[in-house]
Structure formats: C-alpha cells, structure tokens
Image (tube, rainbow, N blue to C red):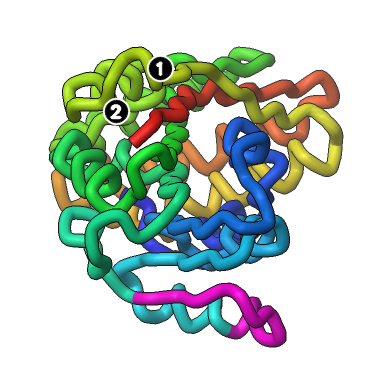
Amino acid sequence: MHGHHESVLRSHRWRTAENSAAFVLPVLTPETTLLDVGCGPGTVTIDLASRVARAVGLDRAPTVLAAAREAARGTSNVDFVEGDAYALPFEDDSFDVVYAHQVLQHLTDPIAALREMRRVARPGGYVAVRDADYSAMTWYPRVAGLDDWIALYQEVSQANSNDADAGRKLLSWVLEAGFDPAGVVPGAGVWCYASPEDRRWWGELWADRCTQSNFAKQALGHRLADDVALEHLADAWREWAASEDGWFAILHGEVLARA
C-alpha cells in the first residue's frame, strides 16, 4: 500500500519499542528470542534487541533490509532476513515472541499470516500484533481535503483487497486463526500528533505520500484519482499542519496471544 518511498520510511524510522510495541514489553526477558515480521527499516527491531537475547527482523524488500542492517551495525544480537509472511523461513517453534506491527492491514489473507506466525512461535510463547484503524482516525480542525484523503485511502485499500480498518478486527482474526481465547489479551494504543513539531512532521510526510509514494501510484493505477486530486490532498495536509490548534490521533488495535 505504501511502499518504501522516503516519506514512508521517514515515519517508519520514527517508531520505537515504546511507541509501537509497549504492549509486548512486559513479556520480554533477557532470554527471549523474538521475530519482527515486516520489520521495515528495523528501528523497532533494534530497540527490541536491546531487551532480549536475540531478535530477527524479516521483510520482503531487499533495499529496506539493507538500510536496517546498516542501522544495526555494531549490534551483535540482531539479524535481518528476507522472507514472506505467508511462508516464514524458520522451523516450527523457533521464537518466544513473534511480533508484527502495521502488517496485517496490508495482507489479502491476514488469518493465514497469523497461523504462520503461530507456527514459528514456541508453545507458551506469544504472537503480538498491532495495526491502525483508519476509520477510527480523527483530527481537528476539519479540513475538508482530509475527508477526501481518508475516503480515497479506503478505496485504494479495497482495490488492493486489503483492510484499512484492521485494528478493530485483530481480535476476531486471532480467534479465527485458532488461538485459545483464554490466552488472548486484546487492547488498544494511540499515536497523537499535536505539537508544532509533530504537526509539521506528520503533515509534510503525508503531503509527500499523497503525491510520491505507492499510495499515489496505486490511486492513479486504479483510476481512483488523478494528479490534480492528489495535489489537493497534499495541500489539505499542509493546511492542517499549519493550524495552531491542529490535532491528529490514530487508534491501534493490539492483541497479545499465547501460542
């Protein structure tokens, strides 16, 4: 959906264990082995590696994995490998924790991916997933162009057979994947952008995404928007970012499930 344009990686590199995996931290120990599925540029993986015995980041994009390896230079207990969420290149029962952040929303079969994550998690270990819910995003002031943005985002996601509202469905998907309900802990987390610095950063990166990332290419490819419409969305993001009272919140679904 987003690809790996610089505007996308800019937001991915901002992510840390605290702001993207806080619900997982209580189950980590210095003996834990962890797999990060869909690790992107690896900032969260590297942060998690500082808390565990070994961490492995997996992604299907060689270019972003190269950046992750460079970022991890000097860190001895983290590795990055290329792979597919539907066919993880590991033996059964390989990890104590299998974690995926903002991944299931981009898959056509998230339940199959959850079953695969459970396969490589050790019995008694955990599968931990976290995804945003686009329909639950909210902001102020009500810049009309952002209403157009969220509508187009949903249309592109549907055209790709993805689910932009994955956050609210994680619990359902985990249960359908066969996890024991007694070992499933659902929850939620929030990102909020409201300081002048955060507004400027978030608004500018989304303005760039609307015209330069895979989101823009797919909107054009599916004939859901033209260049003029995409520029309109970028302008709306810059208008919101310039508002002194601008506020934007993203709700995430979270599930920690015993394997």
Disc ID at residue 135: 1
Q: Residues within 10 Å of mark 1 (few under 14, many from 20)?
A: some
Image x and y of residue 258, in percent: 39, 31
Image x and y of residue 221, in percent: 17, 52
Which residues, given as a range, are shown in magenta?
A: 70-81
Q: Quadrant of residue 51?
A: bottom right
Q: Quadrant of residue 106?
A: top left
Q: Amino acid at mark 1?
A: Ser
Residue at the spot x=23%, y=48% of the render?
A: 119
* Camera-nearest residue between 136 and 43: 43
Q: Where's the C terminus, which quadrant?
A: top left
Residue at the spot x=81%, y=19% of the render?
A: 245
Taking the magenta stretch, the answer to whether it contains residue 256 is no
Q: Is residue 105 visible?
A: yes
Identify residue for label 2: 154
- The answer to whether 131 appears left or right of 173 in the picture is right
Q: Residues within 10 Å of mark 2 (few under 14, many from 20)?
A: some
Element at label 1? helix
Q: Amino acid at mark 2?
A: Gln
Image x and y of residue 1, in percent: 31, 49
